[in-house]
Image (cartoon, helix red, strand yellow):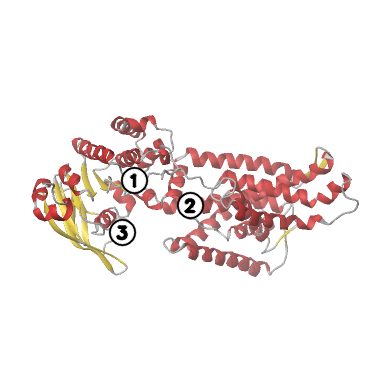
Amino acid sequence: MSLLKVTNLVVSYGGIEALKGISFEVEQGQIVTLIGANGAGKSTTLRTISGLVRPRDGRVYFEGRDITDYGTQKIVETGIAMVPEGRRVFSNLTVLENLRIGAYLRRDKDVIEQDIEYVYDLFPRLRERSWQLAGTLSGGEQQMLAVGRAIMTRPKMIMMDEPSLGLAPLVVKDIFTIIKTLKSTGMTVLLIEQNANAALHACDYAYVLETGRITMSGTGEELLASSAIQKAYLGERAK
Amino acid sequence: MWNTIFPYLLSGVSVGGQYALIAIGYTMVYGILRLINFAHGDVFMVAGIVMVYIAASGLPLWVCIPAVLLITAAVGFIIERVAYKPLRSAPRMSAMISAIGVSYTLQNLVLYITGGLNKQYPTIPGISNSIQIGGATTKVVTVITPVLVILLVAALVTLINKTKIGMAMRAVSKDFETAQLMGIKINSVISTTFVIGSFLAGVGSVLYFTNYPTVIQTSGAMPGLKAFVAAVFGGIGSIPGAVIGAFIIGIMENIIKGLDVILFKAGVIAKPLGLAIFSDAFTFALLIVILVVKPTGLFGEKTTDKV
C-alpha cells in the first residue's frame, strides 16, 4: 500500500480548473516529484493535500485513511508536513522559535528537545544562528530552517514546494543534498520543482503535470531519457 | 514652578495609562488581522455600562470588578466571532466597515437600554478616595493607574515573548497560512487576541470612569479615538509603541489643559489665553503630523526580511 494516494483530484479557483482530475501515488520512503511548467497545478496539488484548498472532486488517502475532508491542523497531526514555496519562515521569530513552532501540536517535551538537536546536527549552521531572527538568514539558511521546521512536526511525509526557487546554483546543490539526506533517514518526500533536471536526478519516481493533467510518469531515469521531456523541460543538449 | 506643573503631570500620566490600556487592544488586533477595530472604544464604554448595572444589583465590588472584566472579554470574543470571523477571506475594507457597524450597534444597544440617560458610575472605595502626593491632591486611582499599567504590560509582553500561545500570536501576525501549516488554529489565536484586548479595555474603563461621574453611550468615542491616535503614534502593531504613545498623549493633553495657569504663574503671560480648549485638538493635530511625517509611527513595524 502506498503512503499517499491521490485519486481523480479536481480543484477549481473561481470557475477555472487548476487540476482536472489527477491521480498519483507516493510510496513509503521514496522521493517522488511532480514536474511541470508554471501554472501546471503543482502548487495547487500540494495545497490541496495539506488542506489549504478544498477540492471539488476526488479523494486524498494517507496510510489508507481518507483525509480529503480533514482540516489543515488534523492533516499536520496525521503526519504530512509542508515546506512552502518561498520558504515562508517566520521572520519575526528566532531560528529556535521557528523550530519550536514546528512542534506546536506536540506534547512530548523531551523528544522535542532531542529533535531540535537532531535538526541542529543536520544543519549546524542553524545552531550557530539559533538566537537570530529568521528574517536575517540567507536564502539557503532559510530553506534549511523551513525543512527543519517541517521535521519538527514529526511527519511521515514532507512536501516541498519549489525548494530551489530563487537560490544560487551552489545552494541549490545543497538543497538536493538535504533532500537525499532526508530520504536516507527513511523520510518520504513529495517534491515539486521547476528545476526538472535536478529533480529527476534526485527522485525515485516522477509525474509530469501539464495544465492540470498528468501527462507522463516514470522513474527519474526513464523520464530523463524521454525525448519529449528533454525537449520540453531540459532543453536541447549541447552537442 | 514644579508645584504648578506636577498635578497636571500626575493626571497626565494617569490618563495616559488609561489610554494605554485601550490602545493595546487596537494595536494587537491590528498586528494580527491588519484591522482597525473601530468598535474597540465602544467595548470600553460597554464595560462602563455593565459596571453601572452590576453595581446597581448590590453585589460587592470584589465580585463586580472581575465580573465586568469577564463580561467585557466575552463581548470582545463574541464581536470577533460574529462580525469579523465570517469576513476572514473578504477584502480588508469589508471587515473595517463591519467594525464601524459593530460600533454603532453597541452604541445604539446601550442607548436603548439606558434610554439615553447619563448613568451614574459607582464609587469604588479605595481608588476613588483622595490622597496627597508631592503637594498635590488627587484620587488614589491616579497613582494606581500607571503602576497597574506597567504590571499589565509587563505580563502581556512576557506572554507574547515567552509562552507558546504568544509565539503562535507572533507567527499568525506574520503569516496566516504558514501558521496553519504548523497546526496552529488561527481562529483561536485571533479570539485570544480579542479577549486580551477587551479585558485590558475593561480594566481601563474601571480606572477611567472612576474619574467621571457618569457613563453614556458615547462615552467610549473620545477615549477610543485618543487611544487609536496613541497606537498610530507609537507605530500600530507595536505594544510598547502604543503604551509610550498613550503616555505621551495623556501627559501632553493635561499639560495643555494647565498651560494657562503654568504660563501665568511663570510670568510669561499676563492674562489667561484659554489654551485649555486646544487639548483635544492637540491630539488630532499630532495624528495628522505623524501620518505626514512618519506614517509608521515611533516603533512602526521594522522589517527584518532580506531582500
Discs 2 and 3 lie in a common subunit: no
Q: In the depicted view, which residue is nearer to us: A170 or A209? A: A170
- On the picture, is B132 further left or further right than B301? right
- The residue under the point 78% across, 52% down is B257
Q: Chain of mark 2?
A: B
Where is residue A94 shown, x and y percent of the image? 43, 37
SS at circle 2: helix
The kind of residue tagged 2 is: Ile
Circle 1 is placed at which residue position?
Answer: A87
Task: Evaluate whether residue B130 shows in this view.
Answer: no
SS at circle 3: loop
Circle 3 is placed at which residue position?
Answer: A53
Task: Evaluate whether residue A119 shows in this view.
Answer: yes
Q: Is residue A114 above or below residue B230?
A: above
Disc 1 or 3, which lies upstream in sequence? Answer: 3
Asked if disc 1 and disc 2 are in contact, CB closer than 8 Å, the reply is: no
The kind of residue tagged 1 is: Arg
Q: Chain of mark 1?
A: A
Discs 1 and 3 lie in a common subunit: yes
Q: Determine the image quadrant of residue A10.
A: bottom left
* Callout 2 crowding tier (Cα within 10 Å): few <14, some 14–19, many ≥20: many
Q: CA distance from mark 1 to mark 3?
A: 19 Å
Circle 2 is placed at which residue position?
Answer: B32
Tell which tag, 1 or 2, sits nearer the viewer: 1
